[in-house]
Image (cartoon, rainbow, N blue to C red):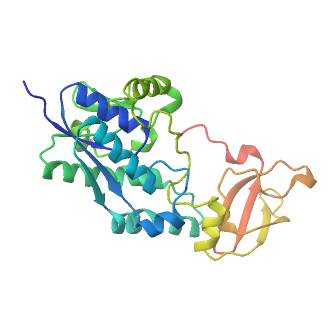
Amino acid sequence: MKKPRVLVAMSGGVDSSVAAALLVEQGYDVVGAMMKFWSDEELATSCNSESSCCTPTAALEAGWVARQLGIPFELLDYRETFAERIVAPFLAGYAAGRTPNPCVWCNTDVKFDALLEYARAVGAEYVATGHYVRRLEGPTDVELWRGGDAAKDQTYFLWGTPRAALPHLLFPVGHLQKPAVRRLAEARGLITAQKPESQNICFVRGSLREFLAEHIPSEPGPLVDLESGEVIGEHAGARFYTVGQRKGLGLWKSHLERYVVEVRPETNEVVVGPRAAVEWWGL
C-alpha cells in the first residue's frame, strides 16, 4: 500500500535533511519546502551569518539535499508575515521591558499554520520537521513528548502548537541522538552532514545588543537596588537587560552579586537584587 504524501520543512540543516531522507526511505511521497522570511538584500545585511535557517546558503543547501534525495523542492515566500508577526512584536517586547522568544512564536504562530495550509494545497497529509520531539499516540489524543536526545530536546519551542495540528505532524529524527543523525547524514552522503548548528536568533546580525540599539532608541539610566532603593550604578539602556541577567551590570568593583529583577522602560530604570529575588521553583 502506497504511503501518503508528506511535506518536509527543510532548513538547510542536517536534522531536516535526515528527516527527509528517512521518510523517502520509508516509502513516503515526500515534498520539500523552505520558508523564505527575507529578501536577498535583507539577508545580506540582517540575518545572522551563523544561522542555518534563513541565509541564501541555507536555501541553496536545502535545494541541493532535495535534489540528492530526488524530491521536489519549493521556496515559499513569507517575508511580509514574518516581519509583521515575528520581528515587529519582538522589538515591541524589548521596548516594553520584556524578553520575547521569537523562535517559539515562529514555530507556533507562523510555520505550522503556513506549512499545514501549503501541505493541503499540494495534497500532503502530513508536515514533517527535524525537531527533536516525539509525537506519540496517547490514551485519547496525539501527544507531544520530549525528544530522545535530552540535550537537544525542543518541546519547549513547540509548546504552543495547536492540538488539532498534532495528528498531522511527523518528527522523523525525534527519537534519535544528535550524533546518530550526523552519522545517518554521512552514510547517505548528504552535504549538510557536518553543518554547524545554529544557536542564534536568525534575524539578528551580530550581537543582540547591537540589533536592539539599531532599532530601539535608548539611553543610560540608573541601576536601582531592590533592597535599599538606592542607585548603585548606571546601565547602558533599560531595553538591553533581561530579568535574571547578572553579567554586564558593571558592579564588579563593588563586589555585589546582583541580578536584574525588573526592567522599567517607562522610567528607564533597571532594578537589581540578590539571587533569591529571581529564583522561581514553579510555573
Pick whichever, 188 or 46, lies toward us. 188
- Tell me if 131 is positioned left or right of 283 in this view: left
Tell me: residue 228, above or below residue 213: above
x%, y% of residue 59?
A: 38, 52
Of residues 213 and 16, the one nearer the viewer is 16
Where 164 sits versus 76, above or below? above
- For the point 79% across and 64% down, the residue is 223
Total of numbered circles in the picture? 0
User: Which sits in the foreground, 81 or 37?
Assistant: 37
Residue 2 coordinates in the image, percent (x, y): 9, 28
Q: Which quarter shows the N terminus?
A: top left
Residue 98: image x %, image y %? 57, 61
Q: Residue at x 55, y 50 (%)?
A: 50
**x and y percentages locating residue 184 in the rendered image:** 40, 24
Q: Residue at x 21, y 28 (%)?
A: 140
Residue displayed at 67% across by 75% down: 218
Q: Is residue 188 visible?
A: yes
For this view, does 237 lie left or right of residue 198? right
Image height check: is 164 above or below 236? Answer: above
From the viewer's perspective, tell me whether residue 16 is left or right of residue 211: left
Residue reaching furthest left? Answer: 1
Side of 62 where 223 appears, left or right: right
Tell me if residue 11 can be seen.
no
